[in-house]
Image: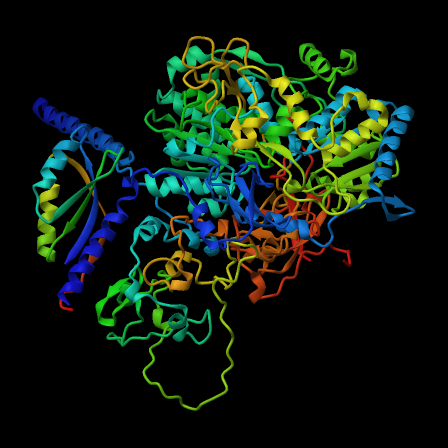
Amino acid sequence: MPVKSYLAHPEEGQKEDLIKALSKIDHCDIIPAKNKDLLIVVTDTDNKTDDEKVKASIEAIESLKLLAMVSGFNTPKNK
Amino acid sequence: MKKRLGIISLFVMLFLAFIAIWNYSYQLGLEEAYIPIEDQNHLYAIPSESGVFRRSEHALDYSNMPVDENHQRSLTTYYENRAYHGAPPSIPHPVNEHQNMGGQSCLKCHENGGFAEKFNAYAPVTPHPELVNCKQCHVEQNTQSLFKSGHYASIVAPKAGVNHALLGSPPMIPHQIQLRENCLSCHAGPSAPIEIRVSHPERVNCRQCHVPNTQEMTAVGTFKRAGNEE
Amino acid sequence: MQNSLTSRRKFLKKMAAAAAMTAAASMFPGIIFASEQDANVPKGGNLDWKKGPCRFCGVGCGILVGIDKGKAVAVKGDPNSSVNKGLLCVKGYHQIMCTQAKDRLTHALVKKNGRYVQTPIDEALDLVANKMKETMEKHGKDSVAMYTSGQSTIPEGYVASKLMKGAIGTNNLDCNARLCMASAVAGFLTTFGADEPMGCYEDIDHADYFITWGNNMAEMHPVLFSRMLEQKNRRGAKIIDFATRTTRSSTASNTSILFEPQTDLAVANAICYEIIKNGWVNKSFIENHVNFSKGITNMGYGLEDNYKFKDKPTKINFEAYKKFLEDYTPEQVAKYSKVSVKDIKYLAAIYGDPNKKVVSYWCMGMNQHTRGTWMNNLVYNIHLLTGKISQPGNGPFSLTGQPSACGTAREVGTFTHKLPKGVVMNEKHRRLAAKIWNVPYERIPSKPTYHATEMFRAVDRGDIKFIWTQVTNPLVSLPKTSRYRPGMEKDSCFVVVSDVFPTPTSDVADVILPASWHIEKSGLYGNSERRTQHWDQMVEGPGETTPDAWMTIEVAKRMGYGDLFPYSKENHVEEIYKEYTQFHEGAKHGMAPLEVLKKESGAIWPYVNGKSTQWRFNAKYDPACKNGKDFHFYGKPDGKAVIWQRPYEPAPEIPDAEYPFWLNTGRVIEHWHTGSMTRRIPVLHKAVPEAYIEFHPDDAKKLGIRNGEHIKVSSRRGSCVLPASINERGLPTRGQVFVPFFDENMLINDVTLDAFCPISKEPDYKKCAVKVEKA
């Protein structure tokens, strides 16, 4: 059950578009960072495949310039 | 002949163009990438100094944390699994993975702490998560009996609340800090023993006010001038 | 189980977010802390809390001292003081304990046949006055000197200046602030024509970046550093440490950049080069508010006696300045500064970004520098080029090390060239002083005489035959004490030392006068942010201890200047302050009246119409701005600040085959300056009982040195034996060693070099060449 956080850098002047696009994706929280031209994205999915799907759909957003992972955690599955 | 020359010169042109374009893109590639990620290389070179600040990014979280009064530790329970104060604590709970050295399986809970329902307690936070061979120093207690009984000497652990010099002045650090340079790991958060939990974890520069008392190693008297008997 | 899993998952999510979120935290009000400390003090006690400034550093924290039956028993931070908002450092919390030390000087001691004999204070003062008079009669008035301190209170500095310059008529008055703040003063005067920082500590609450130049604030200005850390954690402000040694500050900063000693000059120029090259110059600011100048280069280092230097400024234009900077491309500078091109560009980009507010902080790293004045000028250049000055959160800020380096040494002017307002060289300033002092104008000499280093050289040469030191310990704090100690021991000079404790300086005295400590007298201090603070006497001092100001007045009376010193013993502090403030009347330097200072935890000058001026030279905040523009640098006749063309020049002594290490000296958080007070506080002494010599672990390994081993460090001037310290408090770069100077039993200043900045005359304690061997 991977939990990951990313820094999302929008294309210049397209921060708002990026926020809109991101908010449409499930399992994905956005945290605004003040005075910064970037966003914090936290994803929380049930398994590796979902995680990859979410990542792929984020990366497909046009207003996104760059997505950089900051940290990742994995909760144990069966305990 | 002319035709052949034409073809050769075409290929030469193409080749030159290729070199030019390749060079250009190679030069572009040499330019710095855009990613302005901050340089996060923390310096752990001077442990006693850098360690103090290591958990400071969580300081605000600590100060906002409510106190869970039902699951607090006290100094008594804190010292229970230590042979003497400053000794590495033994592992007070069963361990499933017997073959590893500890590492990630211990750090899962002990790097950042949190409530463990299984033990009805908060996991203590390690002040030295970079040392991953946990079981080198921390071992399980699999029996309550002794091989042979003995006269084991004991030393008195420092008491809390008595280490200040003046009314209300900040207490000195009454213990050594080797491997325990990170103050917040033991003095803040829900797993901190209640007597030594700091009331102001947001003030991260601990040693601005709390200085070590070297008494434990060598008793230092008061200041004496050289060549002055007084 | 499911429950714990979801909570764990939530927790992990929070952790993941926190890891990426340092920048997102919003602003909170400042530190409110004392209320909590209050809770720890038993309730219902008879403690009477009295307010004052802290005795130690130049930050000037407000303290409250708990008095129980006439004894000081506790200290806490003053929550009403905007400086520290209730927080102190370990020195501040324990300061009152030093007064109870066993070897406190309680009575006057006069040396008779090689032994100190306890003497009634009146008799001792008679002796001092007679000796001073006799020396003047025999050898002229320039044969007597006074050496005071940035720890002297405002009244103490004022009466010393009045006695020497007004009554006696000699400029033989200098102070230990020459050793710490002179370069800052010269920097301010050359660039702005007006001394002291334009901003204030509130800048910390607004800035996005703090860049510290050769300054270990976590240990030396801990309360300010804690305010910065708070902004870092809450608001995501960034601290960038630019230094020659890795310290506690480096480990707490976002970025630590190391440079080779002395190359800060080149790096500052490289930053300016980048700013111009990338078009980050604030053009309208430059056009309206800035002139360009250059001065004399290859000035020398003042190593020879009677060294003289006078700068000759020449006006230049922007193009010439730009041309000059071409020698300082990041690529060229990186080669000898050991700062990477990337780091230089990074620093320039921070200063150059118009949307980022930047404060530069510095203290001894830049001031104790053979090109200290230049270095101060260069940092001002950066701020002037980008127009980041005199605004909340934007500005250069020169920190001070002593509690009244600003208030007394710089504002009262206890330097040889200074008067309470202006300088002795200026006729108008001399006339003003003569008028307020009620002395003939001709009596105040127009030529400065000895600055600190030269004053002790003159003692050694036998030119000065009487010296009186107050509130300072030069035989620990001067550079090259290996020359000046024997100099002061000579019979040719009569030495009077006023102090609270015996020190290596009082050891060579002919008369020792017992001074009152801080809270045993009333007084005023002025801190780094131009804040004047007053305190009333809180406890009685032991024995015959007497306030320094009063001892000076008593000596003046005995010398026949009684009519110039008509003050009363009970109220002399207030009477003197009222007389002194006449010097600074007006919008540019008006001082707060005593009634205000008694009520409030200090006030910042210029104090105009009942209000402190927080940002000088900015028309929005400073009523003295009169040119109708946004900024007015009214210290200069044309209202414009100066960008100085100052090159990189090497240090006077550079490590070589025989002396292969740089020696850097400094302080630790636990001890203050020469340790005469802090070492007598048990908490502090136990934490750091003695000095040490820090090595880089690689150097230690190469030399086979282990932690704690005794090491002899020697230079061409002297040597000193200290225990080695590896990977403890600090980490010098390879090829550098560091020694704190607080330990009078291990005098590192026997080893240091007495080279100084030719403009400011401030010595460089941070760089000289030494060798090390096992003792």
- Residue C629 drawn above or below residue C705: above
Q: Can you say whether C618 is above or below C84 in the image?
A: above
- Considering depth in this image, is C186 or B168 the residue closer to the camera? B168
Coloring scheme of the render? rainbow
Q: Position of residue C333 (x, y in %)?
A: 47, 31
Position in image of residue A79 (x %, y %)? 16, 69
Residue at 52%, 46% (x, y): give it: C76
Image-based side of B64 in relation to C619, left or right = left
- C516 relative to C336 in the view: left or right: right
The tally of labels here is 0
Observer able to see residue C648? no
Q: Nearer the viewer, residue B45 or C569?
A: C569
Query: For this view, does C649 lie left or right of residue C157?
Result: left
Quadrant of the image occupied by residue A2: bottom left
Q: Is residue C76 above or below residue C593?
A: below
Query: Depth check: C228 or C91 in front?
Result: C91
Q: Is residue B167 visible?
A: yes
Q: Position of residue B174 (x, y in %)?
A: 51, 63
Quarter of the picture holding the N terminus of chain C: bottom left
Q: Nearer the viewer, residue C673 or C761?
A: C673
Location of the C terminus of chain C (image quadrant): bottom right
Instruction: Tell me residue C498's x, y (percent).
Output: 76, 39
